[in-house]
């Protein structure tokens, strides 16, 4: 936060308690909301399975010890690049380190996002999906609250009722769905852990990302 007429909160620094002072946001512990997402009948082809198997074999012993940029470049980016969220005709692509800002008359949420999929080819016009934190442990920050802040910005900038995202802590992925309940009021759902060091979970992560891609492309 900086000293200004309207306080500014940065995605990369916002803490759980700060976010809850800004908005009314509460967890919902039901996992039923993930059923359609996680149980979609996506079948990986043999090339995808071989890609994931080889990648994991190569990086297995490094995932937990990589620093942020190492983890992103060596393990996360190859997966996201293979998913390939870009569709030139529909003007949709993935962005790394894209700045977005959500302003109200009481606070400003802003910052550089780790990864998002958005409408727009040159810059983000309408963000649909966020991934936050390529860090090796929770001592590095507050990945869930940082992601939630980004998702709130995405909901409000798009006038959405719900939006999806994920955060990564070392090998562990968690997916999140956030819903707007009213003015400045939200609830969010956090998935079970997906351990990317296990091939079965890595396949599920990959399927979950394909689902998001298909959903975004079908929406446009």
Image: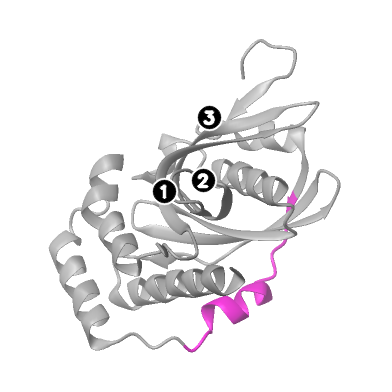
x and y, in percent, of residue 135 in the image:
36, 43
The reply to whether dot 1 and dot 2 touch (C-beta < 8 Å) is yes
Return the residue at label 2: 124
For discs 1 and 3, the disc positioned in front in the rendered view: 1
**In the displayed structure image, the side of residue 40 where residue 210 appears, left or right:** left
Return the residue at label 1: 95
Within 10 Å of the Cα at label 1, are there few (<14), some (14-19), or many (20+) other Cα atoms? Answer: many
Say which residue appears at 79% left-offset and 26% top-offset: 106
- What label sits on residue 13 in the rendered view? 3
Q: In front: 121, or 131?
A: 121
The reply to whether dot 3 and dot 2 touch (C-beta < 8 Å) is no
Say which residue appears at 25% left-offset and 57% top-offset: 75
Q: In front: 73, or 216?
A: 216
Task: Report if residue 126 is visible in the image.
Answer: yes
x and y, in percent, of residue 132 in the image:
47, 47
Vertical relation: 18 (above or below) 7: below
For discs 1 and 2, the disc positioned in front in the rendered view: 2
For the residues labelled 1 and 3, the Cα–Cα distance comes to 20 Å
* Residue stretch in magenta: 26-41
Q: In front: 188, or 179?
A: 179
Q: Earlier in the sequence, mark 1 or mark 3?
A: 3
**In the displayed structure image, the side of residue 48 where residue 180 appears, left or right:** right
x and y, in percent, of residue 209 in the image:
44, 69
* Location of residue 9 (image quadrant): top right
- Quadrant containing the C terminus in the rendered view: bottom right
Vertical relation: 128 (above or below) 213: above
Q: Is residue 60 magenta?
A: no
Q: In front: 47, or 216?
A: 216
Vertical relation: 200 (above or below) 19: below
Q: Is residue 39 magenta?
A: yes
């Amino acid at each position: 936060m900086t000293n200004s007429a309207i306080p500014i909160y940065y995605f990369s620094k916002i803490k759980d308690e700060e976010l809850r002072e800004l908005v009314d946001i509460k967890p919902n512990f039901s996992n039923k909301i993930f059923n359609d997402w996680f149980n979609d009948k996506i079948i990986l082809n043999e090339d995808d399975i071989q890609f994931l198997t080889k990648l994991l074999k190569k990086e297995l012993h490094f995932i937990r010890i990589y620093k942020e940029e190492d983890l992103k470049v060596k393990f996360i980016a190859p997966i996201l690049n293979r998913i390939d969220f870009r569709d030139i005709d529909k003007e949709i692509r993935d962005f790394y380190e894209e700045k977005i800002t959500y302003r109200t008359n009481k606070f400003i949420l802003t910052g550089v996002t780790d990864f998002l999929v958005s409408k727009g080819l040159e810059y983000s016009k309408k963000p649909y999906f966020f991934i936050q934190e390529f860090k090796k442990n929770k001592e590095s920050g507050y990945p869930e609250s940082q992601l939630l802040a980004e998702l709130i910005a995405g909901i409000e900038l798009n006038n959405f009722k719900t939006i999806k995202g994920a955060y990564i802590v070392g090998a562990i992925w968690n997916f999140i769905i956030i819903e707007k309940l009213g003015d400045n009021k939200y609830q969010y759902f956090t998935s079970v852990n997906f351990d990317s060091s296990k091939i079965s979970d890595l396949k599920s992560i990959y399927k979950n990302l394909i689902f998001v891609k298909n959903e975004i492309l079908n929406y446009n």
